[in-house]
Amino acid sequence: MSKIPISVCMIAKNEEKHIDECLKRLEFYGFEIVVTDTGSTDRTVEIAKKYTDKVFEFEWVNDFSAARNYCVSHASNNWILTLDCDEYVHSIDVSSLRMMMQKHPRAVGEIRMKSLVQSRGVTSYAVDVVRRFYNKNYYFFEGAIHEQIQAKDERQRGKAFEEITLPMEVIHHGYNLTPEEMNKKSERNLTMLYKALETDPNNTYMLYQAAHSESMRGNYFEAIPLYEKALGIIDTVTCEFERLMIMALGVDYVRTGQFQKAVEVMERYADQCRTAKYMFTHANVLLDSGDHLRALLLYIKAIMMPDADTLGVNKLHCFENIIRIYTELGNTEMADLFRQRYEECRQENDKIVNR
């Protein structure tokens, strides 16, 4: 296969569990691979050197952007694809990707990442949209934690990116953790997030991430004020994390018994958040609040949305709730119809989880 001028850049620390499989899956595509190690004490560096001679060391300074930008500085190509060691590429349409690069030289590329998650000992998956592809002449990473791609030209700051969806399938294994492992990860993140908020207390993205980490630990009453503060700063919803923040707040209102607040916040932003994920979460809030008929309507709308594939395993939950509500209503014919759709969806979910 002819080489494509892309450098895959990744930072690593004690990733011997994942890095071999990650790099093995990249070999076929002929990309340049650049690995920056931030202090591993296992075989991470040894394994990385099997696949590339571009393995560098970086002294960890509690700043993910600093490490990523250092890694990118050693890339030979202008186009950068950033991956983590626990993210495995399953397929790339290289011809389509090459055409995208030629047609959209200043675009930022998004991956619809399938993240394996563990709940009560059962593995399923969620879909996250992540920005991971860019031209280093125009962009770099910014933010000590939960780093984001940012324009180098300050005149472009705050403006919307031209975005493209990359023709590739990537499965993320890093969230397939036990509750203890997830709690430890959230605790580490919170330490860095609160430190960042000390110097930039109105940073809505950091407020969202801190709230999300608190919620992951079950600290819903600590998470809610952080979400509310961030929403109080935002005028209109313009990006993905803001939609995720509203959904998370609605869910945490439900978890704390504040059902009316949950319904109000979901409905306040519904016109600005026309996505399958938002519609699914809105339906859940209505269901938990006792409004089963409106929930049914939104579940059906969610599975028919153009971006319904972003629901991941929640598409399966849509079908489960549709069947449940139709059964409650005594409409066995419609319940049976959706059972067939449910089974097709379940088989697709199993294929992804068991790859």
Image (cartoon, rainbow, N blue to C red):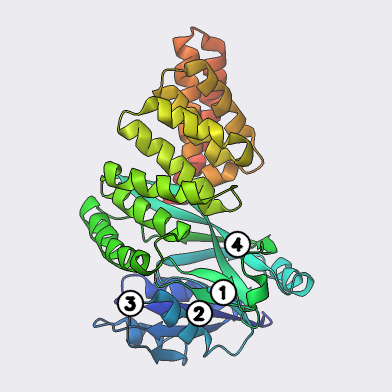
Give the percent coordinates (x, y) of residue 251: 39, 37
Q: Earlier in the sequence, mark 2 or mark 3?
A: 2
In front: 181, or 242?
A: 242
Asked if residue 69 lies left or right of residue 189, the reply is: right
| Residue pointed to by mark 3 | 62
The correct choice, above or below, for 117 with respect to 18 in the image is above
Dot 3 and dot 4 residues touching (CB under 8 Å)? no
Alpha-carbon span between mark 1 and mark 3 = 22 Å
Distance from disc 2 to disc 3, alpha carbons, whole Å, reads: 19 Å
Q: Which residue is rendered at x = 47% and y = 41% of the image?
A: 247
Distance between mark 4 and mark 2 Cα atoms: 15 Å
Residue 280: x and y in percent read: 51, 34
Q: Amino acid at mark 1?
A: Leu
- Dot placed on the residue nearer the N-terminal end, 4 or 2: 2
Circles 4 and 1 in contact, beta carbons < 8 Å: no
Which sits earlier in the primary sequence, circle 1 or circle 2?
A: 2
Secondary structure of the residue carrying tag 2 is strand
Q: In this figure, which residue is indicated by the disc labeled 2?
A: 9
- Indicate the secondary structure of the residue bearing disc 1: strand
Is residue 136 toward the left or the right of residue 321 in the image?
right
Q: Are marks 1 and 2 in contact (CB under 8 Å)?
A: yes
Percent across and percent down for residue 309 are: 58, 44
Front tag of 1 and 3:
3
Three-letter code for the amino acid on which mark 3 is drawn: Asn
Residue drawn 44% across the image and 59% down it: 202
Determine the secondary structure under disc 3: loop
Q: Residues within 10 Å of mark 2 (few under 14, many from 20)?
A: many
